[in-house]
Image: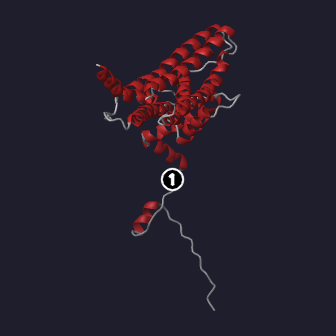
Amino acid sequence: MANTDFHLQFQEFEDEQGFTENNQGATTVTIDDPIKSRKQRKATGTAFEEEDDDDKTELLSGQRKSAPFWTFEYYQTLFDVDSHQVKNRIVGSILPWPGKNFIEVYLRSNPDLYGPFWICATLVFAIAVSGNISSFLVHQGQPKFRYVPDFSKVTMAATAIYSYAWLVPLALWGFLTWRNRKITSLVSYSFLQIVCVYGYSLSIYIPAVILWIIPNEGLRWCSIVVALCLSGSVLVLTFWPAIRDDKPRITTAIISTIVILHVLLAVGCKACFFSTYEMDPSKYHNEPSTATSTSSTN
């Protein structure tokens, strides 16, 4: 049977220095005073930890300072958006719902320029590429036809799309700001919010422009009407709360201007890049016969 008698012996150490001298191979563990330790870390701490504490305090209090507009950090916040938000905003601009304001539902106080910029860029190249393909399909089979890509369509499309996506919101923002000073009850939108709405409203034109490759005027006009109704509804439903308390004459004028400019953009792109006269190749075949009949009569 094992011996169960244990002899416990306690020994007092007079000081730490004497213990370490008698036990050279011993390992010592020092437990500092937590208050003293914090003071030492604070005295020798790095600036990185202090900056982290300041950032956390600003985020929790909601008083984080915004960077000046001439700095890179200011514009970096305008592109700080994830793919889920962009997808929801694109879907919201394609499927308008009565009573839902695009700014209040999807943007709130976080407008972005990432979505509008790439939507406009995609639309520009879609118009240019689809226009060149459509021109090739229309003239294919003609004896003297030689396909040459028209790169000027990229420049023309970029000028039209980006001018519309920036100048029209700028003019609308200026007018709404002026009316808001006269009638304080009107809802006010920032310039970035208006730019964001107009940029996302153009997303429906990308599939419509791709359909314009098919050389069928009926299909083209049907796609234009559908795109105009969907995107135009988004614009009207969004800006209606900002002007409904204004005078009826001014309200009608603003809504009419928004719709007319939207229609002019779609019809102008259709007429410029997918012209109707290209759909009548018979005139190219009638010219030789007319010249032959003229020479025979002489």
Kindly indicate the quadrant of the structure image that contains residue 110.
Answer: top right
- In the image, what residue type sits under mark 1? Asp
Q: Is residue 104 above or below residue 255?
A: below
Q: Is residue 58 above or below residue 25?
A: above
Q: Position of residue 142 (x, y in %)?
A: 35, 35
The residue sitting at the front extreme is 297
Other-residue count near label 1 (Cα within 10 Å), few / some / many at <14 / 14–19 / ≥20: few
Q: Nearer the viewer, residue 231 or 61?
A: 231
Residue ID for mark 1: 32
Question: From where the camera sits, is residue 6 visible?
Answer: yes
Q: Position of residue 244 (x, y in %)?
A: 69, 16
Q: Quadrant of the N terminus?
A: bottom right
The residue sitting at the bottom extreme is 1
Q: Nearer the viewer, residue 219 or 263?
A: 219
Quick one: SS at disc 1?
Answer: loop
Q: Quadrant of the C terminus?
A: top left
Kindly indicate the quadrant of the structure image that contains residue 73.
Answer: top left
Q: Is residue 6 above or below residue 297?
A: below
Specify whether 29 is left or right of 89.
left
Q: Position of residue 95 (x, y in %)?
A: 63, 34
User: How many marks are shown on the rendered structure?
Assistant: 1
Q: Position of residue 98 (x, y in %)?
A: 70, 29
Q: Nearer the viewer, residue 258 or 278?
A: 278
Q: Is residue 30 above or below residue 287?
A: below
Question: From where the camera sits, is residue 68 visible?
Answer: no
For image coordinates 57% across by 17% down, the residue present is: 260
